Amino acid sequence: MTFQGWPEEAIEFYEGLEADNSKAYWLAHKHIYEECVVGPMAELLDELTSDHGNPRIFRPYRDVRFSRDKSPYKTEIGASLDNGYVRFSAQGLGVGSGMYMMSADQLDRYRQAVDADPSGQALEQVVARIRDRGIQVNGHGALKTAPRGYRPDHPRIELLRFKGLVAWREWPVQPWLATAAAKQYVVEVLAAAQPLNTW
């Protein structure tokens, strides 16, 4: 099967799940989830694997052990590739690529590279080109002040404050989501983010 987008039933499934996040709703509509939500995601990932790496679809169940919100099901489907992430929900489509969270040693190396003029200036140019295409570039978290050891007026202080660096774009529900054209939106973000991953 080739990817043909997510049908309207997929949107309706998540709208219903948002209104009734219960086991009863889930079991009554699970066939729609499998056919209209997971099926298209699997087809999309299958077509992206050769260029973007190993795919993985995340489980639909929430980990509620340490959460006040005990609703059992996620109201979106998410999937990862070696160099990207795709999310679909009743709100539309989201695509991202980059390093969402850095370990302490990765963050230290990242900040040293941002601080150094040749590599830091190169990253500035990469980020500017991605943003010029209407794609956000930001971090999973950001410090409110300069990281220890870096001055607050550093020319790349925004990049230094990030704890991760991700290119991300979202689209609300539009007719093209139910067509094969949705793949091109995903591919364009992943391609635009490639220089960021290379850096």
Image (cartoon, grey):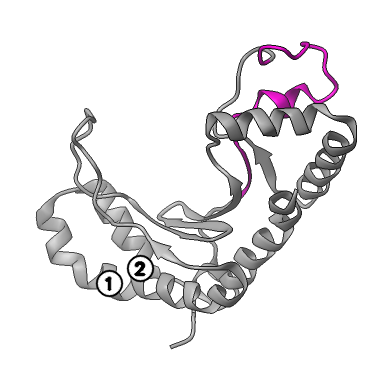
Between 77 and 51, the one lying in front of the other is 51
Q: Specify the quadrant of the image occupied by residue 192.
A: bottom right
The amino acid at mark 1 is Glu
Between 134 and 48, the one lying in front of the other is 48
- Location of residue 25 in the rendering, given as x and y in whole percent from the top left corner: 15, 57
Identify the disc placed on residue 37. 2
- Location of residue 185 in the rendering, given as x and y in whole percent from the top left corner: 63, 65
Badge 2: how crowded within 10 Å, few (<14), some, or many (20+)? many
160 in magenta: yes
Question: Along the horizontal axis of the image, is 41 left or right of 173?
Answer: left
175 in magenta: no
Residue drawn at x 66%, y 12% is: 148
- Location of residue 133 in the rendering, given as x and y in whole percent from the top left corner: 78, 52
- Location of residue 135 in the rendering, given as x and y in whole percent from the top left corner: 70, 48
Which stretch did the figure color magenta?
Answer: 147-169
Inter-mark Cα distance, 1 to 2: 6 Å
Q: Secondary structure at mark 2?
A: helix
| Residue identifier under label 1 | 34
* Residue 86 vertical placement versus 130 (above, below): below
The amino acid at mark 2 is Val
Question: Along the horizontal axis of the image, is 173 left or right of 123?
Answer: left
The quadrant of the rendering that contains the N terminus is: bottom left
* Residue 189 vertical placement versus 1 (above, below): above
Spot the residue most to the left: 24
Q: Secondary structure at mark 1?
A: helix
